[in-house]
Amino acid sequence: MIKLYNKYRVQSLDDLVGDLPFINKLKEDAKTGWDHTYMFYGEHGISKTSVARIIGNSLPDCYIEEISSSVDNGVATSKAIARNLNNLPLGYSTKLIILDEIQKASSAFFDALLKATEETGDSVYFCLCTTEFNKIPKNIKSRFTKLKFEAPDLKSMRDHLQFICDEENIKTSKKVLTFICKKNKLIPRDCISDLELIIGIDDIEVQLDLLENTDVDEKSVGFALAQLLNKGNWNKVSELLLTVSESDVEGIRRIVLNYFMKTLLNGNEKGAEVIEEFESPFFDSGKAGLCKAFWDCM
């Protein structure tokens, strides 16, 4: 199943939620011409890399090279960028280099990046994305058009969630949507992810109870466990269960129930078996009960 955030990922500047300065600046640049060097900074989950891709897709015959600086952050990568800076693959006339999580780059990487921006031709563009603006060297900041990405206002975010609910036939209330927005500090990705927890649950109080008792870590682990269980991959399930604490057990149980209720409604018969094993709380048996339930469903 496609996650809601991926399904409703920003595809154009008009998809950005709210009326914020960075959105207006980008729309103006789209009309007058993109800058060659952007630095997008702000919280996670507010579409920095998505907007970078939008820029790339709007450039003529653009080759998009996306690099995660949390992985490729050393000398070899920086040298490769500099060496191939103005080389375009056959059939492309422009290139956009997206450097995500740039705050994790090494000092050598930043040195090479500084040199690369000095030698950038008219056909090459850069978009740097970071959640930790304070960690970026000043000489790098000075070379880039800096845009602070911010979360939307409450009404805009709630209206966007309501739009998704209407599209997906999710039954909920303004109270629940407001709670989701405030709980997730209006971060679009986190807000949309929380909607997945309440799909198929019509009782508003049950929705609120589930949302109140499930944190972000439980959510990601719970979905991962449910997906692995659906694939029947016990080795991966057991590895992930080792990371689960006793306090996470009930939240994960509810996520698994919600996940397999949806698969059952979509015709997956295994959903009924899983629901039977997970229908009772694990307050008494704790993590042992959770592990046993996963094992019985394999």
Image: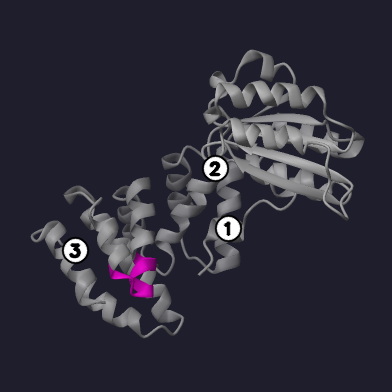
Relative to the observer, which residue lies in front, 287 or 239? 239
Q: Choose the circle earlier in sequence order: 1 or 3.
A: 1
* SS at mark 1 in the image: helix
Q: Choose the circle earlier in sequence order: 2 or 1.
A: 1
Residue drawn 35% across the image and 66% down it = 226
Residue 95 appears in which quarter of the rendering? Answer: top right
Q: Choose the circle earlier in sequence order: 2 or 3.
A: 2
Q: Position of residue 67 (x, y in %)?
A: 63, 42
Residue 156, placed above or below residue 282 = above
Q: Which mark is residue 186?
A: none
Q: Residues within 10 Å of mark 2 (few under 14, many from 20)?
A: some
- Cα separation, mark 1 vs mark 3, equals 29 Å
Left or right position of 262 against 88: left
Tell me the kind of residue under disc 2: Gly
Relative to the observer, which residue lies in front, 292 or 11? 292
Residue 243, placed above or below residue 186 = below
Residue bearing the label numbered 3:
290
Tell me the kind of residue under disc 1: Asn
Q: Is residue 51 magenta?
A: no
Q: Where is residue 105 in the image (x, y as percent from the top left)?
A: 56, 29
Residue bearing the label numbered 1:
6
Residue drawn 90% across the image and 33% down it = 122
Residue drawn 71% across the image and 31% down it = 22
* SS at mark 2 in the image: loop
Q: Are marks 2 and 3 in contact (CB under 8 Å)?
A: no
Q: Where is residue 230 in the image (x, y as percent from the top left)?
A: 37, 74
Residue bearing the label numbered 2:
45
- Cα separation, mark 2 vs mark 3, equals 30 Å
Residue farthest top in this picture: 138
Tell me the kind of residue under disc 3: Leu
